[in-house]
């Protein structure tokens, strides 16, 4: 399993955000590099248009939420190149139990719509 710790989160009241209550550790299956997302990290879930929720699932559903936290972390600090972050998002979705076809739809979504969020991460 690529996630080496269990997910422990809390939902922030009145906001579409979750906060990690415990470090989340991920081992990338391709690079074998370990990534530690520290407790206190805030995530807005998977940026998915609401009209797709009934088809693809809610942005905070499992396994989407774990992969979304990882992806937000990678984008926010430009921890890895964008294409690598997107591939890790896809891998995390599949590794946590999502069907490959559905994971590919998510992957195509971040590849086609994630550039501005990645660029924003480099400034903040």
Image (tube, rainbow, N blue to C red):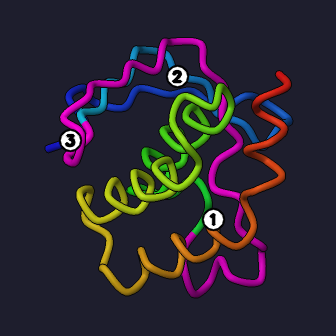
Instruction: Look at the numbered discs 3 and 2 and tell me whether their residues touch, using CB distance below 8 Å.
Output: no
Neighbours of disc 2 within 10 Å: few (<14), some (14-19), many (20+): some
Quadrant of image for the N terminus:
top left
User: At x 25% / y 26%, what residue is drawn?
Assistant: 5
The residue range painted magenta reads 28-57
Q: Position of residue 3 (x, y in %)?
A: 25, 36
**Which sits earlier in the primary sequence, circle 2 or circle 1?**
2
**Which sits earlier in the primary sequence, circle 1 or circle 3?**
3
Residue 42 sits in which quadrant?
top right
Q: Can you say whether 60 is above or below 40 in the image?
A: below
User: At x 73% / y 44%, what residue is drawn?
Assistant: 118
Neighbours of disc 3 within 10 Å: few (<14), some (14-19), many (20+): some
Q: Nearer the viewer, residue 12 or 4?
A: 4
- Separation of disc 2 and disc 1 at Cα? 22 Å
Left/right placement of residue 108 relative to residue 6 reads: right
Residue, disc 2: 20
Q: Secondary structure at mark 1?
A: helix
Q: Nearer the viewer, residue 45 or 27?
A: 27
Q: Nearer the viewer, residue 23 or 32?
A: 32
Task: Kindly report which numbered mark, 2 or 1, lies closer to the viewer in this rendering.
Answer: 1
Q: Position of residue 53 (x, y in %)?
A: 65, 77
Residue at far left of view: 1
User: At x 20% / y 29%, what residue is drawn?
Assistant: 4
Residue, disc 1: 110
Is residue 46 one of those drawn in magenta?
A: yes
Q: Secondary structure at mark 3?
A: loop
Is residue 98 one of those drawn in magenta?
A: no
**Which sits earlier in the primary sequence, circle 3 or circle 2?**
3
Residue, disc 3: 2
């Amino acid at each position: 399993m690529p996630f080496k710790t269990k997910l422990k989160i809390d939902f922030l009241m009145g906001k579409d955000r979750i906060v990690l209550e415990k470090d989340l550790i991920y081992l990338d299956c391709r690079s074998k590099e370990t990534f530690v997302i520290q407790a206190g990290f805030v995530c807005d879930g998977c940026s998915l248009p609401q009209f797709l929720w009934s088809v693809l699932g809610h942005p905070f559903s499992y396994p989407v939420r774990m992969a979304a936290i990882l992806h937000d972390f990678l984008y926010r600090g430009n921890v890895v190149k964008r294409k690598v972050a997107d591939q890790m998002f896809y891998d995390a979705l599949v590794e946590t139990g999502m069907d490959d076809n559905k994971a590919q739809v998510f992957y195509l979504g971040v590849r086609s719509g994630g550039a501005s969020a990645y660029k924003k991460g480099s400034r903040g």
